[in-house]
Image (tube, helix red, strand yellow):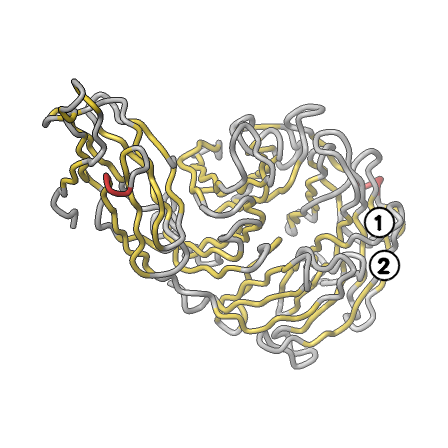
Amino acid sequence: MIRARRLVTSLLLAACGGTEPQTPLEIAIQSGDGQTAVSGERVAERYAVIVTKGGQPEPGVAVTWTVISGGGVVTPPASNTDGAGVARAVHTLGVLAGAQQVRASIGGAPQSSVRFTATARAVPEPVVVASIPIPPNYGIHDTFVRDGLAFVCAWNTGVMIFDVGNGISGGSPASPVLVSSVVPSAAPLGTLSAHNAWWFHNPVTGEKRYLFVGQEGPGTIGVSSSGDIKVIDVSDLVRPREVGSFHYEGGGTHNFWVDEARQVLYAAYYNVGVVAVDISGTLSGDISGRLIARSAPGGNGSTYMWGIMLAGGRLYANDMLSGFWQLSPTTLQPVAGGNNVPERFGSDLWVRGDYAYSGTWGAVPRNGAVGNALKIWRLSAAGAPVLADSLIVTGIETVSDVEVSDDGNLLVLSAERGIMAGLHVYRLTDPVKPALAGRIMVEAGLHTATLARIGGKLYAFAARNPRDPALIIYDLSGLR
């Protein structure tokens, strides 16, 4: 309920004719008091005060907004009254549950002020079931989970394979067991830089033989990148071995997606754009000659591709520089979209049905914005993306990984830097309006997170870096 307007008479007096006081300014709450919102989130309605003099609205009066309890943020910290004598501000609640207060005052004088009170509602936390230390040889990056096995890309330590429910070593999500490790060759970077992986299940041969591992080397956004794709034979999971590699001159790989039915690997290749590689049959040695197609959708200097995903027979890509694209799965040429996120750098993406979600990143503001936006896209009948909304995740600077659960009920993102860095989980009852279902804060945040259903429960496998690197496994089954 919005409390009844309270009227406070300003005690600020000015000399008038030497002895007579000037008509005082008066400040009162117009709207926005008494709201309830999730802790760490903005209240739905802006706070508004009205300033009057002699009963008439007074424009151009400076109103100062100050958080006095709860630890949240109010923006802007000062605002002037408009022609109707009204000044407004937005309150982002602190992370602690309970009552939180903001004071609005004339000229910053506490005695000429009113107080707004909001109630912060606690958010359920995902349950941590395991935290596996990773050697601090930089630490941990992506994790690929399939058939109860977690392939942890542990950078210069290589790839660590854990049983988290497969049965090969008696592991579970709560008690992962290391099955083996493999150290890909360091060439051409001189370091391993195991960044991401995909365990290929070949539907033609029935083999589960190859693990593709991406290296991530040094680069400059829009200009250069480095790193190869390594082919690891995991037909014997206890003794995996490198058997081949793919190199593209002048570029380095980032995230993968594999069209297993067609036996094609798609790789986001930073400044090179997107490449498609034939991975059918037996793989050995240099497989660079298996390149099928390559495309830089944003053009040279304006392409720096983060991620790629095949969904519903359509190919989607998110570029740091040129935005969210629909590409041809065969030629990789642009079909629709692009040049549609001008204010932020793009990051990860996920497509589910008629909707797609893409992240943004950046510790340094770009055009005044940081990477705290999740872009929500509505896909046309032909798959063309149209921006439907943006979800602003307050208190962070990077949305890194984005994924929707296999049943379409939850959207999960990993967030870095800021007081709200960690794991954020949203309900997708309305795909355009994700509703916060749970979150857990992690100091410095989580660089990556991926979902897997094991034993009927949904888990998130997340990477904590750089201090005390760890694979953290969260049980999300209690979040609805």
For image coordinates 53% across by 53% down, the residue present is 421
Residue at the spot of label 2? 242
Using the image, determine if residue 179 lies above or below residue 344. below
Amino acid type at image mark 1: Ser
Visible residue check, residue 464: yes
Residue 10 percent coordinates (x, y):
19, 35
Asked which quadrant contains residue 14, the reply is top left
Q: Nearer the viewer, residue 11 or 469?
A: 11
Q: Nearer the viewer, residue 174 or 56?
A: 56
Asked which quadrant contains residue 155, the reply is bottom right
Amino acid type at image mark 2: Glu
Q: Residue furthest front?
A: 18
Using the image, determine if residue 8 lies above or below residue 322. below
Q: Secondary structure at mark 2?
A: strand
Residue 455 percent coordinates (x, y):
52, 74
Please give left or right for residue 16 compared with residue 461 in the image.
left
Please give left or right for residue 188 compared with residue 17 in the image.
right
| Total numbered labels placed on residues in the image | 2
Residue 28 percent coordinates (x, y):
18, 38
Residue at the spot of label 1? 245
For image coordinates 28% across by 43% down, the residue present is 110
